[in-house]
């Protein structure tokens, strides 16, 4: 079984701090992930004025605007992220939440795009992403079948490479809500690669998803699950990251090949010892 493409979702768990982002990139690289992913928003386009002016206590101030602007990186910071990922030899990309953010990301000549579950119903965004022709991961959380149908049609019509990612948009997700059999249903219905984007605690559900032959696996990561932020509690710390990647690689080795009717060379001497008391009938 092939090891899935492993994506470490930094998202907004950097809390607007470039040094935290770099440490998370380090952790992703050191634990064997293939890529890190961020989220990019143009605050005034994604949220209305009433929402932004409403009260919200945070490390950055007392309004929603203060909090959301505090979580966004500027051009210089993303350029530093771009350079740092090249240094650490790990891919990076981001989910754009609006067209201006998508255009912002164009300048970095990224290898992938990501459609966040929240954005799968935005046909304008989907069309613009598909026009760019980059392989795109499409999360299906909070989606009706018609939403997935529309997204798949757009990417097929534009001849843009894509894969779906089964996702349940609760934070953290309860294992009984994972419904991983949906992975095979998506494969059958759309005839495409299917990955898994998980928001659960621990690694057991993700490993179960791997056993179903997913093409990609995305998990949120953090330096500390008790840090400020809505996604931190559903994220993996470094120990969990290494547990996940090590377990996947061990499972991949363990699947091995079919051995029906064959024994290992190492078993021969053991079998002679353990069966020495048995009289073989001819």
Image (cartoon, helix red, strand yellow):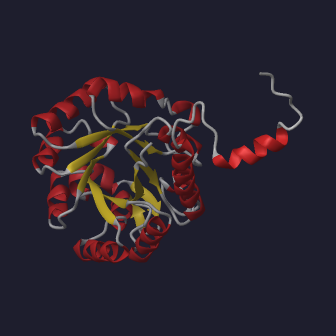
Q: Residue at x 48, y 59 (%)?
A: 221
Q: Splitting the image into 4 quarters, where does residue 24 fall? A: bottom left
Depth check: give the residue in front, 236 or 42: 236
Image spot of residue 223 (x, y percent):
53, 66
Q: Does 169 appear above or below 4?
A: above
Depth check: give the residue in front, 210 or 44: 210
- Relative side of 237 to 120, left or right: right
Q: Which residue is the extreme one toward the right? A: 277
Which quadrant of the rendered structure holds the N terminus?
A: top left
Q: Is residue 40 visible?
A: no
Q: Splitting the image into 4 quarters, where does residue 139 fall? A: top left
Q: Is residue 129 visible?
A: yes
Q: Does 213 appear above or below 229?
A: above
Q: Splitting the image into 4 quarters, where does residue 78 fall? A: bottom left
Looking at the image, how many numbered discs can be counted on the residues? 0
Image spot of residue 39 (x, y percent):
32, 57
- Relative side of 142 to 249, left or right: left
Q: Which residue is drawn at 47% across and 35% down?
A: 212
Depth check: give the residue in front, 127 or 264: 264
Image spot of residue 218 (x, y percent):
42, 50
């Amino acid at each position: 079984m092939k090891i899935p493409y492993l994506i470490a979702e930094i998202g907004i768990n950097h809390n607007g701090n470039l040094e935290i982002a770099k440490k998370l990139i380090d952790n992703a690289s050191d634990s064997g992930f293939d890529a890190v992913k961020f989220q990019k928003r143009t605050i005034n386009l994604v949220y209305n004025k009433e929402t932004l002016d409403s009260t919200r206590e945070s490390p950055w101030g007392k309004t929603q605007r203060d909090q959301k602007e505090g979580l966004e990186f500027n051009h210089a910071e993303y350029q530093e992220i771009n350079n740092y990922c090249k240094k650490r030899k790990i891919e990076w990309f981001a989910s754009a939440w609006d067209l201006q953010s998508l255009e912002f990301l164009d300048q970095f000549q990224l290898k992938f795009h990501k459609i966040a579950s929240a954005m799968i119903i935005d046909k304008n965004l989907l069309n613009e992403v598909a026009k760019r022709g980059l392989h795109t991961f499409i999360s299906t959380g909070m989606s009706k079948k018609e939403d997935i149908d529309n997204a798949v049609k757009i990417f097929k019509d534009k001849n843009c490479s894509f894969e779906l990612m089964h996702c349940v948009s609760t934070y953290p997700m309860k294992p009984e809500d994972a419904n991983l059999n949906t992975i095979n249903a998506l494969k059958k219905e759309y005839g495409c690669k299917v990955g898994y984007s998980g928001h659960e605690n621990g690694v057991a559900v993700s490993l179960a998803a791997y056993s179903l032959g997913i093409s990609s696996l995305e998990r949120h990561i953090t330096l500390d699950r008790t840090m400020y932020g809505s996604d931190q509690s559903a994220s993996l710390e470094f120990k969990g990251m290494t547990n996940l990647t090590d377990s996947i690689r061990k499972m991949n080795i363990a699947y091995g090949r079919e051995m029906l009717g064959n024994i290992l060379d190492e078993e021969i001497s053991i079998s002679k010892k353990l069966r020495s008391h048995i009289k073989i009938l001819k």
